[in-house]
Amino acid sequence: MGNYNKVILMGNLTRDPEVRFTQSGTAICKFGLAVNRRFQDQSGEWREEPTFVDITIFGKRGEAFAKFHAKGKPAFIEGELRLDQWEDRETGGKRSKLYVVGNNWEFCGSGRGGGGFEEAPASYGAKPEASSDFDDTPF
Protein backbone atom coordinates (compact mmCIF):
# COMPACT_ATOMS: atom_id res chain seq x y z
CA MET A 1 0.00 0.00 0.00
CA GLY A 2 1.24 3.50 -0.82
CA ASN A 3 1.94 6.31 1.61
CA TYR A 4 0.06 9.56 1.99
CA ASN A 5 1.28 12.49 4.09
CA LYS A 6 -1.08 15.49 4.03
CA VAL A 7 -2.07 17.89 6.81
CA ILE A 8 -4.71 20.63 6.64
CA LEU A 9 -4.94 23.01 9.60
CA MET A 10 -6.81 26.19 10.43
CA GLY A 11 -6.07 28.07 13.62
CA ASN A 12 -4.50 31.17 15.14
CA LEU A 13 -0.80 32.02 15.30
CA THR A 14 0.68 31.63 18.78
CA ARG A 15 3.69 33.81 17.99
CA ASP A 16 4.91 36.14 15.27
CA PRO A 17 6.49 34.35 12.30
CA GLU A 18 10.29 34.25 12.46
CA VAL A 19 12.15 34.34 9.14
CA ARG A 20 15.76 33.24 8.74
CA PHE A 21 17.77 32.59 5.62
CA THR A 22 20.02 29.69 4.69
CA GLN A 23 23.51 30.36 3.37
CA SER A 24 22.11 29.93 -0.14
CA GLY A 25 19.49 32.64 0.55
CA THR A 26 16.39 30.45 0.96
CA ALA A 27 13.89 31.83 3.47
CA ILE A 28 12.75 29.64 6.36
CA CYS A 29 9.64 30.92 8.14
CA LYS A 30 8.75 29.33 11.51
CA PHE A 31 5.71 29.97 13.68
CA GLY A 32 3.26 28.23 16.00
CA LEU A 33 -0.40 27.55 15.31
CA ALA A 34 -3.10 26.80 17.88
CA VAL A 35 -5.89 24.54 16.60
CA ASN A 36 -8.88 23.97 18.87
CA ARG A 37 -10.80 20.73 19.22
CA ARG A 38 -14.39 21.30 20.33
CA PHE A 39 -16.11 18.47 22.21
CA GLN A 40 -18.71 17.68 24.85
CA ASP A 41 -17.39 16.51 28.20
CA GLN A 42 -19.07 13.84 30.35
CA SER A 43 -21.43 16.41 31.88
CA GLY A 44 -22.62 17.47 28.41
CA GLU A 45 -20.91 20.88 28.45
CA TRP A 46 -19.01 22.04 25.39
CA ARG A 47 -15.27 22.49 25.86
CA GLU A 48 -12.36 23.49 23.67
CA GLU A 49 -8.95 21.88 23.88
CA PRO A 50 -6.06 23.53 22.00
CA THR A 51 -3.37 21.63 20.11
CA PHE A 52 -0.18 23.58 19.47
CA VAL A 53 1.59 22.83 16.20
CA ASP A 54 4.96 24.12 14.97
CA ILE A 55 4.92 25.09 11.29
CA THR A 56 7.80 25.76 8.87
CA ILE A 57 7.32 27.31 5.42
CA PHE A 58 10.27 27.52 3.01
CA GLY A 59 11.06 29.98 0.23
CA LYS A 60 9.04 32.89 -1.13
CA ARG A 61 5.81 31.53 0.34
CA GLY A 62 7.37 31.71 3.81
CA GLU A 63 8.49 35.30 3.27
CA ALA A 64 5.01 36.29 2.08
CA PHE A 65 3.36 34.50 5.00
CA ALA A 66 5.51 36.41 7.51
CA LYS A 67 4.73 39.70 5.80
CA PHE A 68 0.97 39.36 6.24
CA HIS A 69 0.58 37.38 9.48
CA ALA A 70 1.21 38.08 13.15
CA LYS A 71 0.51 36.54 16.55
CA GLY A 72 -3.21 35.99 17.10
CA LYS A 73 -4.18 36.14 13.40
CA PRO A 74 -5.97 33.20 11.77
CA ALA A 75 -4.31 31.12 9.06
CA PHE A 76 -5.11 28.11 6.88
CA ILE A 77 -2.12 25.82 6.26
CA GLU A 78 -1.78 22.83 3.94
CA GLY A 79 1.36 20.74 4.27
CA GLU A 80 2.97 17.51 5.39
CA LEU A 81 4.36 16.02 8.58
CA ARG A 82 8.12 15.92 9.05
CA LEU A 83 10.15 14.29 11.83
CA ASP A 84 13.54 15.63 12.88
CA GLN A 85 15.77 13.39 15.02
CA TRP A 86 19.02 14.33 16.73
CA GLU A 87 21.24 13.54 19.68
CA ASP A 88 21.08 15.93 22.65
CA ARG A 89 24.46 17.60 23.13
CA GLU A 90 24.14 17.81 26.92
CA THR A 91 22.71 14.41 27.79
CA GLY A 92 23.60 12.38 24.70
CA GLY A 93 20.02 11.13 24.57
CA LYS A 94 18.01 10.79 21.39
CA ARG A 95 15.54 13.60 20.71
CA SER A 96 12.88 14.07 18.07
CA LYS A 97 10.34 16.65 16.99
CA LEU A 98 7.27 16.23 14.79
CA TYR A 99 6.22 19.38 12.91
CA VAL A 100 4.40 20.49 9.77
CA VAL A 101 6.12 21.74 6.63
CA GLY A 102 3.64 24.15 5.09
CA ASN A 103 3.43 23.82 1.30
CA ASN A 104 0.49 26.18 0.78
CA TRP A 105 -1.34 28.77 2.84
CA GLU A 106 -4.39 30.97 2.51
CA PHE A 107 -5.81 33.93 4.32
CA CYS A 108 -8.85 33.24 6.45
CA GLY A 109 -10.99 35.33 8.77
CA SER A 110 -13.14 38.37 8.31
CA GLY A 111 -10.79 40.44 6.16
CA ARG A 112 -11.18 43.32 8.61
CA GLY A 113 -7.95 42.93 10.51
CA GLY A 114 -8.56 39.20 10.93
CA GLY A 115 -7.01 37.83 7.79
CA GLY A 116 -5.50 40.75 5.94
CA PHE A 117 -7.55 40.47 2.75
CA GLU A 118 -7.40 44.18 1.95
CA GLU A 119 -3.63 44.59 2.10
CA ALA A 120 -2.60 41.33 0.40
CA PRO A 121 -2.01 41.27 -3.35
CA ALA A 122 -3.45 38.30 -5.22
CA SER A 123 0.04 37.00 -5.99
CA TYR A 124 0.55 35.97 -2.36
CA GLY A 125 -2.08 33.20 -2.40
CA ALA A 126 -1.49 29.52 -1.90
CA LYS A 127 -0.57 28.52 -5.45
CA PRO A 128 2.62 26.44 -5.46
CA GLU A 129 5.63 27.95 -7.11
CA ALA A 130 8.58 26.23 -8.70
CA SER A 131 10.60 24.67 -5.93
CA SER A 132 14.04 25.04 -7.48
CA ASP A 133 15.17 27.14 -4.50
CA PHE A 134 13.72 24.70 -1.95
CA ASP A 135 16.27 23.77 0.66
CA ASP A 136 14.99 21.70 3.55
CA THR A 137 18.30 21.70 5.38
CA PRO A 138 17.63 22.54 9.03
CA PHE A 139 19.38 25.60 10.41
Image (spheres, helix red, strand yellow):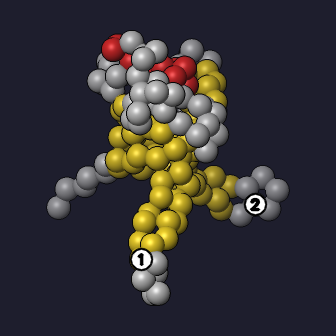
Q: Where, quadrant-wise, is the C terminus in this rendering? A: top right
Q: Position of residue 116 (x, y in %)?
A: 46, 24
Mark 1 or mark 2, which is nearer the start of the sequence?
A: 1
Q: Look at mark 2 in the image and give the residue it sits on.
A: 92
Is residue 137 depicted above or below 3 in this figure? above
Q: Position of residue 97 (x, y in %)?
A: 57, 54
Residue 100 or residue 113, whichever sits in front: 113
Hey, what amino acid is under mark 2?
A: Gly
Please tell me in which quadrant of the rendered image residue 132 appears.
top left
Is residue 39 depicted above or below 70 in this figure? below
Hey, what amino acid is under mark 1?
A: Gln
Q: Is residue 80 visible?
A: no
Q: Position of residue 112 (x, y in %)?
A: 46, 27
Residue drawn at (41%, 33%), measured in percent from left and top? 110
Residue drawn at (37%, 31%), measured in percent from left and top? 106
**Farthest right residue?**
90
Q: Is residue 11 visible?
A: yes
Is the residue marked by circle 1 packed among few (<14), some (14-19), or many (20+) residues within 10 Å? Answer: few
Q: Look at mark 1 in the image and give the residue it sits on.
A: 40
Viewed as shown, does residue 126 lie left or right of 73? left
